[in-house]
């Protein structure tokens, strides 16, 4: 996934583009660049590396102008080099393009364009788009279209995108049109910001905060034609549209780093508040149940649901796994948790009373979006559990539940995970109270839920212990994460956190499963992290822990305060408050997030921008 920005208006554009790219860097950060139109020329500044590297490039070699586009990249085609970074030139510079997405048929288009004499400087699919627009522009002019008419540019872009297979969010500017910015969307998000005598383009609304409150989210197959004083919206099939103008929240403080060294640490410590926000206004104490405003399904429809599918990717899939245990325990409805990338092609048999939830922080994950569309196409009520208001999945779902966790900037998801688990717990309460859950059971759940924010606060106090023990394990290159029942998904999540920010190989398993193979991996340099709070199967997990110790494997235990037995067995113990089993993931995830963070720091890794990753994967 990549970040795109654009501007046309009356201000100097470079700093607007650079500030916007900093806001979008979480979407991709292996290279960055801008193109600025001025006096009939388009100047390009681009470089491999971070947006800060681009800042330095512009300081040394500034560009002036009030029309421009910018891009921060997560490479899909072509290595991360200066040349492959965006923007890309079409023809001999008469067209310049930035692109987010994947043009799947770019090779065949490249071959045709090469045969027409176009010279390729890069190995990217985006350069194909740039040359194709330049080709159609030249062709339209040869066919008699007016070279000075904006319509000719519009036609050239329409003819080009009609040939694309795959996904794109495009920003296009033209050398001979110093006041024209064209944007087109299919599968990759784009939002237009509406100012006074100016328009903004971005991949999401964050760069627009402080400039405008009025935005238009482009839909698939829509194209925006922007000049300082005009905004035309065209749909591929239905032509001229009237824009649906929405208002964005101007609060930008959420995305400030504050006193924290990294967004990830800030977001870990935000969790008492964000979990509270996920609960806010959703507890009905009188009826001992939960309330949701956006499911858009009446009780009769919900009562008929006899199967639930939760589909997601990565951390959101782990939250879905917790949701499976919760929903099956409290509603007795069978639940299937599906990797979205599998579900979209697997075609499982589903009853017509199956309800589908897409779980996603960003609301833009391509696989999750595709899986949701596949389920919608089959007529299932398809809802979203999502953090980003106005995101594609949130807008296309039949209804849903927002996390209200605020922007999650750190690539490694933390507060979104616990907010997703909280929402799924509330959903289990809500659907359970429509079925077999008694008033008293509902009251008890609510009482326990209301204590969670301060228990997370208390769990965060383990950070000092995490800092103390991490140096002992930071050099290890293989870890096992082990837990059972509600803590099995937590083990998976803890392993993913460590993998993605410290680049250490870590595997999560149900603790008992270790005997069926992974125990062969146990050795003195392979720590096993046991998630072993008190509970119904504590003795069983303890047995698994002893099996590891018997083979001289070091053990880090996540255990309940006051558990002295564990201290005799484990090499190191990280204590957390004791809560009911169904609430344990909200607590036991905390030390695992902090452990991954601390070890990554000790290994000198870039915690907020880990290599090869992006915050939201909007490509297959
Ligand atoms: C989590 O730490 C990862 N960054 C990644 O697995 C993420 O959870 C996954 O890409 C799904 O993203 P989404 O929740 O925005 O759909």
Image (cartoon, helix red, strand yellow):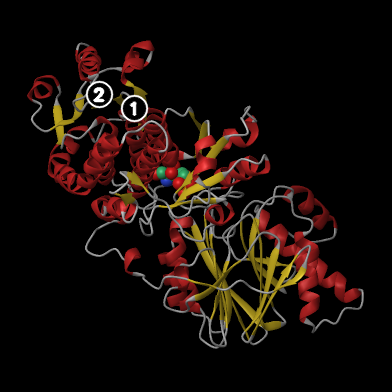
Q: Is residue 459 above or below residue 39?
A: above
Q: Nearer the viewer, residue 203 or 539?
A: 539
Q: Are marks 1 and 2 in contact (CB under 8 Å)?
A: no
Q: Identify the residue position indicated by label 1 in the image.
A: 488
- Dot 1: few (<14), some (14–19), or many (≥20) neighbours within 10 Å? many
Q: Position of residue 616 (x, y in %)?
A: 49, 51
Q: Is residue 290 above or below residue 134?
A: above
Viewer can see residue 220: yes
Sequence-wise, the earlier of marks 1 and 2 is 1
Q: Nearer the viewer, residue 30 or 500?
A: 500
Q: Nearer the viewer, residue 141 or 370?
A: 370
Viewer can see residue 357: no
Q: Position of residue 536 (x, y in %)?
A: 23, 20
Q: Position of residue 152 (x, y in %)?
A: 81, 76
Of circles 1 and 2, the one toward us is 1
Q: Is residue 281 above or below residue 535?
A: below
Picture quarter with the C terminus: top right
Q: Say left or right for 126 vs 448.
A: right
Q: Residue at x 85, y 82 (%)?
A: 146
Ligand 1 image-quadrant field: top left
Residue 525's disc number: 2
């Amino acid at each position: 996934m990549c970040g795109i920005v654009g501007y046309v208006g009356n201000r100097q554009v470079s700093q607007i583009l650079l500030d916007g790219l900093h806001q979008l860097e979480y979407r991709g950060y292996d290279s960055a660049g801008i193109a600025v139109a001025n006096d009939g020329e388009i100047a390009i500044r681009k470089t491999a590396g971070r947006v800060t590297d681009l800042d330095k490039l512009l300081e040394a070699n500034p560009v002036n102008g009030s029309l421009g586009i910018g891009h921060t990249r997560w490479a899909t085609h072509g290595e991360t080099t200066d040349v492959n970074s965006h923007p890309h030139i079409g023809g001999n510079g008469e067209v310049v393009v930035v692109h987010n997405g994947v043009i799947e048929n770019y090779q065949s288009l490249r071959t045709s364009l090469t045969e027409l004499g176009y010279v390729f400087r890069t190995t990217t699919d985006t350069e194909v788009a740039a040359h194709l627009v330049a080709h159609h522009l030249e062709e339209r002019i040869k066919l008699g279209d007016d070279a000075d008419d904006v319509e000719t540019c519009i036609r050239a872009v329409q003819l080009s995108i009609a040939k694309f297979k795959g996904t794109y969010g495009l920003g296009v500017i033209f050398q001979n049109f110093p006041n024209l910015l064209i944007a087109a969307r299919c599968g990759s998000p784009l939002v237009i910001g509406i100012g006074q005598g100016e328009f903004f383009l971005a991949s999401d609304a964050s760069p627009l905060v402080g400039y405008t409150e009025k935005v238009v989210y482009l839909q698939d197959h829509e194209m925006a034609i922007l000049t300082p004083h005009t905004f035309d919206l065209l749909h591929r099939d239905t032509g001229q549209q009237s824009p649906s103008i929405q208002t964005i929240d101007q609060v930008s403080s959420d995305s400030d780093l504050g006193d924290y060294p990294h967004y990830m640490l800030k977001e870990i410590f935000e969790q008492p508040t964000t979990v509270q926000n996920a609960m806010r206004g959703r507890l009905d104490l009188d009826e001992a149940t939960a309330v949701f405003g956006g499911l858009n399904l009446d009780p009769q429809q919900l009562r008929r649901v006899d199967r639930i599918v939760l589909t997601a990717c990565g951390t959101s899939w782990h939250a879905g796994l917790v949701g499976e245990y919760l929903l099956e325990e409290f509603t007795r409805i069978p639940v299937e948790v599906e990797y979205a990338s599998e579900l979209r092609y697997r075609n499982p048999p589903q009853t017509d009373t199956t309800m589908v939830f897409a779980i996603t922080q960003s609301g833009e994950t391509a696989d999750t979006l595709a899986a949701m569309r596949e389920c919608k196409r089959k007529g299932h009520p398809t809802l979203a559990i999502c953090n980003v208001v106005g995101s594609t999945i949130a807008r296309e779902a039949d209804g849903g539940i927002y996390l209200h966790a605020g922007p999650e900037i750190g690539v490694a998801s933390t507060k979104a995970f616990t907010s997703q688990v909280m929402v799924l717990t509330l959903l289990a309460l809500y659907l359970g109270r429509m079925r077999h859950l008694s008033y008293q059971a509902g009251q008890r759940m609510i009482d326990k839920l209301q204590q969670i924010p301060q228990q997370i606060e208390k769990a965060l106090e383990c950070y000092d212990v995490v800092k103390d023990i991490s140096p002992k394990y930071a050099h290890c290159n293989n870890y096992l994460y082990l837990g059972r029942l509600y803590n099995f998904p937590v083990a998976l999540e803890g392993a993913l956190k460590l993998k993605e920010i410290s680049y250490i190989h870590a595997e999560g398993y149900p603790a008992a499963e270790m005997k069926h193979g992974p125990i062969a991996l146990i050795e003195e340099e392979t720590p096993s992290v046991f998630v072993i709070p008190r509970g119904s199967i504590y003795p069983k997990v303890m047995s698994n822990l002893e099996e590891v110790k018997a083979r001289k494997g070091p053990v880090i235990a996540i255990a309940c305060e006051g558990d002295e037995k564990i201290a005799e067995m484990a090499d190191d113990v990280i204590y957390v408050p004791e809560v009911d089993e169904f609430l344990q993931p909200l607590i036991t995830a905390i030390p695992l997030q902090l452990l991954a963070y601390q070890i990554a720091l000790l290994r000198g890794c870039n915690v907020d921008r880990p290599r090869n990753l992006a915050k939201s994967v909007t490509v297959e």
